[in-house]
Amino acid sequence: MPGRSVKSRRGRSDDERNPSNGSEVPAREASGGLNMHRQVSRHADPGDRVLVTTPHSSRAGTLTFEGDYATISFERRIRHPIQVVWEALTESEHLARWYMTRAHLEAREGGSIDYWSGPAQYHVTGKILTWQPPRVFEHEWNVEPRKELPKGEKSIVRWELTPDGEGTILRITHKRLTRPTAIGFTSGIHAFLDRLEDELDDVPLVDWRTRVDEVRANYPGWEARR
């Protein structure tokens, strides 16, 4: 039921997320095709250019490039109440499932986050910049240099929730990422949001790598990055 608290749901193993009993889980839209156009930022130097990508699909993300940095943005309508979505974004037991993250956070403005996140197990640290339950959660997303992120990352993630009837509008913005990282991360965030919806719908979670493979070619720049 859409209004059912996510706290009542048990964890699902990898086998449960990929059932072999022949039952079919309703597929989510996987397209992420983008058109591209250029515009000049009002805040940029005259020689700077901003590249904005605009999705065909309302489920796809957008990438904005400016200088050496980029911003990833997604907006989804989630068919669950705002409090239920907030719990899934901020409580460690839920983050462990859909976000594949071991999370410790001090739930207050000025508190800290300490995540071991995603299949690559990035060690993410940072300060909570905004904590306004159940509407806004903004935090630093800092990773020290490592093989696949040779310069490391010092960026900011912002989750915003807005009630919409019986559901919720979810917006995520990940800004101040380096360009190559942003290009690589967009399809991954797309897949994580699909897993979040599966978690809230109480159905087996889509395999993250499979979903990334399904959507990544539709995000400009992926092939050039590899």
Image (spheres, rainbow, N blue to C red):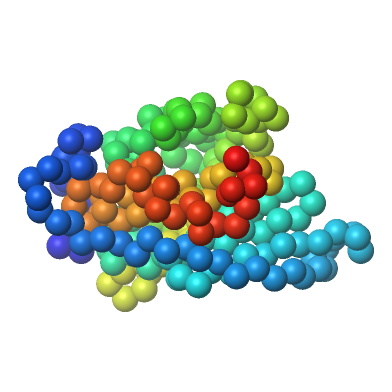
Residue found at the very far right of the displayed protein: 46
Q: Is residue 146 above or below residue 29?
A: above
- Percent from the top left, x then y, of residue 151? 70, 30
Residue found at the very far bottom of the displayed protein: 165
Q: Quadrant of residue 93?
A: top left
- Residue at image point 22% right, 35% down: 14
Residue found at the very far left of the displayed protein: 21
Can you say which quadrant of the picture contains the N terminus?
Answer: bottom left
Task: Tell me, yes or no, if residue 181 can be seen here.
Answer: yes
- Image label count: 0
- Percent from the top left, x then y, of residue 180? 66, 43
- Residue at image point 62% right, 52% down: 221
Can you say which quadrant of the picture contains the C terminus?
Answer: top right
Front-most of residues 193 and 103: 193
Task: Tell me, yes or no, if residue 7 can be seen here.
Answer: no
- Residue at image point 26% right, 61% down: 27
Is residue 29 rendered to the left or right of residue 2? right
- Percent from the top left, x then y, of residue 9? 16, 45
- Residue at image point 76% right, 62% down: 50
Q: Is residue 186 above or below residue 165?
A: above
Front-most of residues 192 and 167: 192
Is residue 20 rendered to the left or right of residue 110? left
Q: Is residue 68 above or below residue 170?
A: above
Front-most of residues 179 and 92: 179
Q: Quadrant of residue 80?
A: bottom left
